[in-house]
Every structure is written in C-alpha cells, then in structure tokens.
Amino acid sequence: MRLDHIRNFCIVAHIDHGKSTLADRLLERTATLDRRQMREQVLDDNDLERERGITIKLHAVRMLYRDPAGSEYELNLIDTPGHVDFTYEVSRSLAACEGALLVVDATQGVQAQTLSNLFLALDAGLEIIPVLNKIDLPGAEPERRRNEVADLLGVEPDSVLLASAKEGVGIDEVLQAVVSRVPPPAGDPDAPLRALIFDSYYDKYLGAVPSVRIVDGTVRPGTSITFGNVDRRYEVTEVGYLRLGRVPQPELAPGEVGYVVAAIKEVADTRVGDTVLDADRRASELLPGYREARAMVFAGLYPTSSDDYEDLRDALQRLKLNDASLHYEPETSGALGFGFRCGFLGLLHMEIVQERLDREFGVDLITTVPNVEYHVRLTNGTEQRVESPTALPDPGRIESIAEPVVRAHIMLPADYIGFVQKLCHERRGVFKGMSYLDPQRVEMNFELPLSEIVLDFYDRLKGGSRGYAALDYEFLEYRPDDLIKLDILVNGDPVDAFSVVIHREKAFEYGRDLVRKLKELIPRQQYEVSLQAAIGGNVIARTNVKALRKNVTAKCYGGDITRKRKLLEKQKEGKKRMKQVGTVEIPQEAFLAVLNLGSE
Amino acid sequence: MPADAFPPVSVGGGGDGIGTVSGGAAATVASVYVHAPFCVRRCFYCDFAVQVRRTGGVDEWLEALAGEVAFVRGEGLFGLADELSTLYVGGGTPSLLGPEAMAGLGRVLGPERLRGGGLEWTAEANPESLTPEVALRWREAGVNRLSLGAQSFHEPALRWMGRMHGADGAARAVRRAREAGYENIGIDLIFGLPAHLGRPWREDLERALELDVSHISLYGLSVEPATPLGRAVAKGVEAPVDEEGYREEFLLAAEVLEAAGYAHYEVSNFARPGAESRHNSVYWTGAPYLGLGNGAHSYTGHRRNGGGPVRRWNRRDWSAYRNAACSGASPEEGRESLSVDAVRLERVWLGLRTTRGLDTAGWKERARELARDWRRRGLADVTDGVVRLTREGWLVMDRLAVELEATLSP
C-alpha cells in the first residue's frame, strides 16, 4: 500500500470515557470484526491468558477502510495502556502514530487523564482529533463540552466531532476525519531498517513477539535483526499484522504497523521504545525516546510458607517472560525468611503482579510495605541507592537521604480544593499552581514525594472527594529531606519487614498508629506480646497484645464432633495465613497494615 | 474403670482412621444416644435441639424413635449389638417425658439388648421434673446412672439462666435418686457466668461436694449467636464471657474437686474412681455410636465404598424429624465422610481432652519438639511417651490441638 493510503492512530481518553467502545465500533464499521467475533475475541483472550499465561490484546489492529470517494486506506489502530503507571509505554505507543482521537465524555468533560494523555500526544507531535462521546446520555452537555474542548485545544468548536459509540452515532465521521486529518506516515524504504517497538507479548510457541512501527527500511522473513539496546541477533521467521489473529505478510514496509516473529527468547529482549535494526546493515542512528523501564515502587514478596520459595521463584521467572518491567532479586528477611525484593512501575503494577502470582501460580504471598528507592549520600562522599529500608546504612554513615519527588496533577470539582490542599500539605506536598478548567472544575499541581503517594494517598483522595478527584503524576527529581528509619520491635526484636523510611516529623504519629493497628491485627498468643515503634534505640510508641487466656470448647456432648471440628478447621485456616516471627505469629495482613493507617 | 481399658490415643503413627473396620456388613454399634427434645422453656444460653412444651409427649417420642429404629435396621449402615454397652438419654429434658418413658424406650430398642450386666444406661434429668415416681420407674426400667442438671445452687444465677429449679432443687433430686436406688449419680455445673450475677463459685463447688455424687461435669458458659444470650451480647446488653473469670473458675474447680477425691479425667469431667462416664468415652475414642432422635449424631469408622469414616446427623427440627421417622423415611439431615485430615484433627483434639493423652510413638521430630515445648511452658506432661495436657493446657486446648495437628500432617 502506498504511504499516503496508510494512517496510524490511537485513541486516548480518561478512564470510562468510551475508548474501547469506540474502538469496537470502528472495527465493526470497517468490517474488520463483527460483533460476534469481538465477543469471542474477548472470551478467547481471557481463556488464553488464563491457560497459557500470555496476553493477546488488540494492541495494534489493522482495518481496511473505503472512503466515500472509493479510495481504500489501511488504518492501524494502536491501543494504549490506560494507567498512570504506564505513562512511558503510552508515550511509545503514541510515537508509533501520526494522529490521536481524543475522546471526551460529553457528561463529564475533560478529566485528569484526558489532559495528561493529550499532553503526551502533543509531545509526540500528533494530530489531535477531538471526539465528544456519549452525546446520547441524558446528562450530556454537548455544546458546553464542545466549547470546553475547543478552548483547550485552541480549535474551532465545529472541528470537535460528536459521537455516541454505544449507539453507533458519528462513527463514519470519525473514520473520515482519520483519513482526512491524520497525516500519512513518511519513511525511506531504501534506508537501513529502523522499527519502533511499542509493545511485546510472550507466546509459548513463538517466543516474544514485538509489535512494531516501521520507520525506515523493510523487514521480511529471513531478515537478521538486532536491537538498539539489546545485543542479540535473531532471524525473522514471520511478519504480518494483527486482526483476529496474526495475518502473515511478505514484508512490512515504512509507515506500516505489525508484528515480528523471530524466536526471541524473552520479552526483556524486546524492550518497549527500543529500535529494531537490520543486523547486517545497522542504521547509524537509533529512534529517539528510548529509556529503561524504571521501577518506582519496591516491595518484598515472601512465600507464606518457606517451603514455597522455589515455587515463588519459578512463578516470578515465568511472569518476567511476559513483563519486562518487573524486576526482582533475592532478598533475605530476618522475619520473613527467603523472598524477593521486587521493583514495579507503580502501585497498580504491583497489584497486578501480586494478583497474578496468587491467581495464576497459586503462590500464597506476604507483601511488605511498598517503598521507593532512596539515594543515600554517605559521609565518605559516595552515593548508595537503597531499595529497601532494611538496607539503609548505619545512621552515622549517612550524610543525607534523597527521595523521588513527582509532579502531581489533580483534577477535582472546585468544592474539594480545601480538602486536596490539606491532604497534599499533610503529605509534604508543595503547591505549584492551580487552573480552572471551567467554573466548577480545577486542576491543581503539586510536587509530592512519591513515598507519600505509594501508601494510601489515592484512596484518601478518592474517599475525601466522593470519588471525583483524579490523580496523575510523573517523576520529577530526587530531593533530599529529613528522612529517618523507623523500626517496629515485636517482643523487643526489630522485625525488618515492618521497617520504613519516613520523614522525621511524621515518625511519631506513624509509629503510634502502626502499633495500634498491629495490636488489632495480631491475634492473642500464649504470652503477652509487646509492640514498640523505635527510631534507632529510642522507643517512641508502645502497646501490648494481651495473652490468650482461654481457647477451649469444653462441651462435647451428644457426639456432635463435626461442628467442633469445623471450628478447629477455621482456626487452622487462620493459622496458615500466619507467619511465625520468632515466637510470635503475625498474620499476612499485618505486613500491609500501614496501607490502612489513618483510614478511620 | 480399669486403667487398661483406657490406653492413650495413637496418632501420626500410620493409622488412618478412628475405630476403622472394613468389610461389607453393617457396623455393629454397642453405644446409643437418644435425644429427648422437650423442655418447659429454653434456657437463656441454650442452642440445643429443643422443643418447648408443657408436658413431654412421650407417645409421639416413642413412635418417632420406633420409626427411626426400623429405618436404621433396613438401611444397613448400623447394626445394633445384641448387647448394648452404653445407652445415654440426653436432652432437652428427658425427665419431662414422665415415668413410663424409659420402659417404653427399652421396648423400642429391644429389651433383650439391655439385659446385659455391663450396660451403662444414663438418663439426664432436671431437678424439678425428677419426681420420686420418675426416679423409681426409670430405675425399674434399667436406668442405672442419672445425670442431673444442677448447674448452680445460687438463686439469681438459676433465674438468669432460666432454670426451673431453685437453690435446693439439686439436693432434693439427689436425695430422691438415692431413695430410688441409684448409686451412680452425676451432676452438671455451669461456670463462667457473668460477674454481675455475683455467683459464689467456691460456695457452689462446696455445695456440690456435699451432695457426694460420683461424677461432676463442668460446663463453661459459651455464648452462641443463635440464643437469647447471644443476641443480648451482640446488642451489648450482656457482657461476653470474661476470659479471666472463666480461667480462674476452671482452675479453682479443678483444684477443689481433685482435693476432694475426684479425678479430672477429661477437660470438663470429674469422677470418683471407676465412675467415669463410659458413654462419653465412646465419643473420645472414636468407637462407633448410633444417635436416635432429632439433631442426634451417629458415627461409624466402617468404610463404605472406599470412603472415610462417616458421621451423620438427623434433622434438628422436631416436627420435621418426627414426620420423616414416623413415615418410614430417613430423618437424616446431612452426613460427611471424614477425610484423612479431618480424622487426624479429631483424633488429636479428642485425644488431648482426656488423661489418656496422646501416644507420641511414630511422631515426627517437630511434633515431639512441640510436646517438649508444652511441657516447658507447663501446658502438658510427657510421661512414658504419652502427652497429657495439664489444667493450664486444657484452658487453651483448641489452640494446642491445631498447633499439634499442623506438626503431624504430612
């Protein structure tokens, strides 16, 4: 297909503004998939994911579209992940496009992710086609929202398309706008191969399969490829594009979007943002914008039963095949035994990994309190990076501790400005400005330590604004502050899994709340258990869990032993979820107790 | 009871079932429990299968039991032994059924099975309904052990519980029982009552000793959700059981009763030498038993179709039970086939209940280490390879059972 008949675009939107419904309608209208196939596709995906531990999403689907004038176009719709943890991935997907549909809910208007996605799309130099969706809903205010979006983009209100993806209204107009407004890709077919990897999935039979956008050159079966940032060589066995499944093609040419099969061992070789090169004819320059996926949040993952350590290791290994952004390395905790320190892109990523380990691999886990990476400057002038509070050097050797600070954008109804100010202030936030999107809605900007966000910030924000406030953030810089390590002592012994790095001014309140919370969570034992929060050798809060004085089902009459046994079985189940730390049994939930502090 | 009939329970040494027998024929049971569901009123704390009525309907009771016995005979899971070893009539309030109830029950079960000299036939009675006639006619029918629901000698406590007898009721009932010729008399006492009742526990124990009975059962008050007490606690009107008080009363009772010559042979039972309840030990040792009446449980280690031992239970509701039993249908409400894990847990828990204890033969090292740890902490004695819980151990027995079972599981 000629370059000027190719359009590469994506859809960006705030969550629930109708991105997937619009995508479905486009596929339907171009007869790429019918409704039945789409349903099956969804079902198949789930089954496949479950059975084979792979993810096949509609990451880049090719549509053929004939415009009213009768010309045929190849439209590549590139999907983007929809969460703040995956901002970098989103930016790479956008880099594979020339245009973006910016979908805005006609009832809700512009939201936090609308803005952050829009800025990413503008950064990528994309042509933006605003689409006001859900115009059929009773609460829709199409004219008001249209003006709002037009103001935001600095365009004429008429250029904002009106649609209802659910009802199939305005779909043709969207397709025509993609053809007429999104510029065709450019590229030099004779130049050495350069293709941008914007996604990759792992297939048990094919290995890692990257999704690519060809920028220059061509790739075809038999091409020897390598990567800009991974020194490996593979021979391509198949190229093509994705529709219901893989559709093999003789080659992928400049401007085209498709997949490459080359028996690539793991997704870590096909890093998002990296450049695919011809191994025999390396281009002199890589595509811009690549960076290593950087873990922002760290936590220890430990098997509840130490017998399951090997299982956990195997499960992490298999997850890693499909998730290049997951980092892990062995770690030993005095309290929890052998486990792994894992790095995640963000909290959602951490939850996904936990969930998959539990559901797909059946590993019973204890997760420690998530923390960020600290940069510790030592008195001898060297710097150390610390991913775990327990790894913090002796206080005497520490010159200063720096922590990651993010730039946070919070979108909220104006009624909650006071609440958000207060919350961010409590979290050591620095107010950086505020702008009204309309008289009711405000975007507030703060610089916040990431460590203050990874605990319960998001829940508090949602809770305090009746669900209306939305958060987005990006990494800003490392900044030193008055940070110290707080330990929790159980029966006088520090339990490393409870240690946190915290600002000195917040340590007392945190320690007091945490020992109180632990007192609720730790069941009574044979002996009294003392709980203390301490900084260095200095105890700042203490409480005790009273001893268990009675635990007996004295009556046993009439032969109803079944019921009594069931009570015992319940105790037994409870005990299984306990971790033995010294002589004290601590339930799994206790290790994440801090996430619920201050929620009362 | 002779000591050699009371060996420690073995667990973890390879046996996979309690009292397991195999083969195609019905299991022979020599122990029968019969439930008498009627009560004049429901006690404040009671969650048993009880039917409230003014007078016991002895005729319908016997009719329903006869129906169930016929059903059981046809079913072929349990076969009654030619001579029963123990028969226990509990409730409810069996004494409410009147003087003819036990003779009638004898006819239902087959008088020939009850003639053996070794039969322990226990019937429970409440002080107010154990009339001289009831005591005498039951004795004539073959009942040779009476268990009296004394509970307390303290008027406010009895009132609070909803008992029908007064402070002197228990003593009168014991006298009547003696006059009717019973030598083997036991009483139940309840402890762990709310402090606001001012129940004088030590005095109650002394009053109990004055009765000079051969057996004393101690029941710690437990708050069950589906009882008036449970609802009162949930509403905050009544205090939950005070663990410290419970503990002190349990320890005091054990001390006082043992000093008076009663052996603390099971966590909640005390007996003069030789007067241990043989029927209850059937539950603790895993021998088969047949339960008749509403809500009654039956158990057999006999394997059917390769499954585990079976425990089953009858419908709890009296009318539902009676309708099924009288029409020749199964009154069963549910049953379970015990897994190897369930058997092990029960064996450990039941084994720890009694002074027979658990035999450590065949135990893994971690289980032995746990037993040594208990001994160090004063929770158990370990003598000649047998673990027996101390009073302190019995107070946290459920937890210890769960701990030990974990070390014995593969």
Image: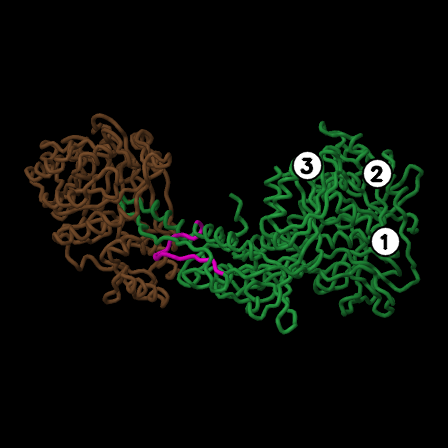
Q: Residue B332 bears which disc, if any?
A: none
Foreground of the two, A276 or A56: A276
Letter of the chain in green: A
User: Residue lying furthest top in this view?
Assistant: B54
Q: CA distance from mark 3 to mark 1?
A: 42 Å
Q: Which mark is residue A174?
A: 2
Same chain under badges 1 and 2? The reply is yes
Co-location on one chain, circles 3 and 1: yes
- Dot 1: chain letter: A
Q: Chain of mark 3?
A: A
Q: Which residues lie in the magenta part?
A: A520-534
Would residue A103 be found to the left or right of residue B71 on screen?
Answer: right
Residue B72, position as x, y percentages in the image: 29, 39
- Where is A192 relative to B310, above or below? below
Q: Amino acid at mark 1?
A: Glu
- Label 3 neighbour load within 10 Å: few <14, some 14-19, many 20+: some
- Which residue, given by chain and number where applicable, does mark 1 sit on? A256
| SS of the residue under disc 2 | helix
Sequence-earlier tag: 1 or 2: 2
Q: Residue at label 3?
A: A413
Q: Amino acid at mark 2?
A: Val
Q: Earlier in the sequence, mark 2 or mark 3?
A: 2
Q: Secondary structure at mark 1?
A: loop
Verify CB contact (< 8 Å) between mark 2 and mark 3. Answer: no
Residue A418 at x, y = what percent?
64, 39
Image chain in brown = B
Question: In 3D space, how far apart are the residues under numbered discs 1 and 2 (Cα atoms)?
Answer: 21 Å
Tell me the mark number nearer the camera, choosing from 1 and 2: 2
User: Circles 1 and 2: CB distance less than 8 Å?
Assistant: no
Q: Chain of mark 2?
A: A
